[in-house]
Image: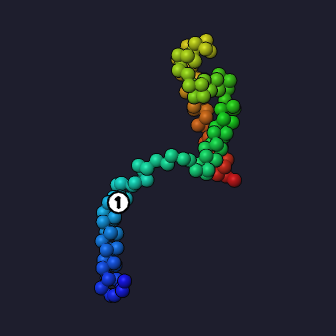
Amino acid sequence: MKVNFYNGLCVSHTICVDQFRKSKKISKVSSTETFDIFNIIEAKEDNMEGAMIRSTMHEQLRSLVDQLPDEQREVIILRHYGDMSFKEISLMTGVSINTSLGRMRYALINLRKMMLQKEAAFLEV
């Protein structure tokens, strides 16, 4: 088969038409000031950096929880790590629900203070 200029032009034209048709099938989404596609897309797998950061944060939080007074530490562990309700905590510890709630409140206040102190010490270095 002899290829001439006209045949080459037809092939080029066909390739362009095919590409145009293919691009019409692929929907395109672009970000705007009010819409960012990355806010919708969820990453199924966590990357190694995210896993390391999360692990480090959990270790630091656990060390802060260990520094709490016994009653406050107990409520934090039972509530967040044991996934127990305040009613279950009060029955287990033998105190009222209000006492359990108060201990949780003071535990969270103390954790916040320790985090702020740790952050301030870190910034001074």
* Colouring used for the render: rainbow
Identify the residue at image location x=33%, y=78%: 11
- Amino acid beneath label 1: Ile
Residue 3 vertical position relative to residue 111 in the rendered view, above or below: below
The reply to whether residue 18 is in sight is: yes
Circle 1 is placed at which residue position?
26
> Could you say where residue 27 lies in the image, as x and y percent from the top left?
33, 58
Q: Is residue 76 visible?
A: no
Residue 77: x and y in percent read: 62, 26
**Label 1 neighbour load within 10 Å: few <14, some 14-19, many 20+:** few
Residue beneath the point at 61% across and 51% down: 49
Q: Look at the image and tell me in which quarter the N terminus lies.
A: bottom left
User: Toward the viewer: 72 or 19?
Assistant: 19
In this image, 72 relative to 4: left or right?
right
Determine the image quadrant of residue 59: top right
Report helix, strand or loop for mark 1: loop
Residue 112 image offset from top left, x and y in percent = 58, 37
Q: Nearer the viewer, residue 112 or 39?
A: 39
Taking the view exactly as shown, the residue that stands out farthest to the front is 1
Q: Nearer the viewer, residue 37 or 89?
A: 37
Residue 84 coordinates in the image, percent (x, y): 55, 22
Which residue is drawn at the image coordinates 59% and 25% (left, top)? 82
Picture mark count: 1
> What residue is shown at x 61% (from left), y 34% (from top)?
111
